[in-house]
Image (cartoon, helix red, strand yellow):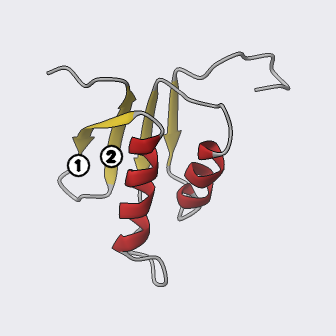
Amino acid sequence: MKELGHKYIDILKMDIEGAEYDVINEMSKSDIRPQQILVEFHHRFQGVGIRETIKAIRRLKIMGYNLFSVSDTNEEFGFIRGPCVK
């Protein structure tokens, strides 16, 4: 963001092979809050497990995100900041 002079992120899409957990953890310590986060969780990876995904989702909720979509495979999740209106 600094390098390109961006002030905010509209949508952050993460398919980063297990690193999403660290990114979400680091985001929670910063003031970076994209309007939407699309993430593929890799809880199927050995040594990761569903508990890490549950912790990441809880962290996102604490950060003000609401879940608006889950894929049929239960791996791709969509979050939006603020209330989710359907």
Total marks shown come to 2
Residue 47, given in percent of the width and then of the height, sits at 49, 83
Residue 5, given in percent of the width and then of the height, sits at 80, 16
Residue 52, given in percent of the width and then of the height, sits at 44, 68
Viewer-proximal residue, 8 or 71?
8
The quarter of the picture where the N terminus appears is top right
Q: Residue furthest right?
A: 3
The quarter of the picture where the C terminus appears is top left
Q: Which residue is mark 2?
A: 77
What residue do we see at 39% from left, 77% from top?
Answer: 49
The answer to whether the residue labelled 2 contacts the one labelled 1, judged by CB atoms less than 8 Å apart, is yes
What residue do we see at 46% from left, 84% from top?
Answer: 46
The kind of residue tagged 1 is Ser
The kind of residue tagged 2 is Phe
Disc 1 element: loop
Residue 32, given in percent of the width and then of the height, sits at 64, 31
Q: Say left or right for 20 vs 77.
A: right
Label 2 – label 1 distance at C-alpha: 7 Å
Q: Say left or right for 13 vs 27.
A: left
Viewer-proximal residue, 40 or 22?
22
Can you say whether 61 is above or below 54 in the image?
above
What residue do we see at 59% from left, 54% from top?
Answer: 25
Viewer-proximal residue, 73 or 54?
54
Disc 2 element: strand
Badge 2 density bin: few <14, some 14–19, many ≥20, Cα 10 Å: some
What residue do we see at 42% from left, 33% from top?
Answer: 64
Can you say whether 85 is above or below 71 in the image?
above
Q: Residue 1's mark?
A: none
In primary-sequence order, the first of circles 2 and 1 is 1
Q: Residue furthest front?
A: 62
Q: Residue 71's mark?
A: 1
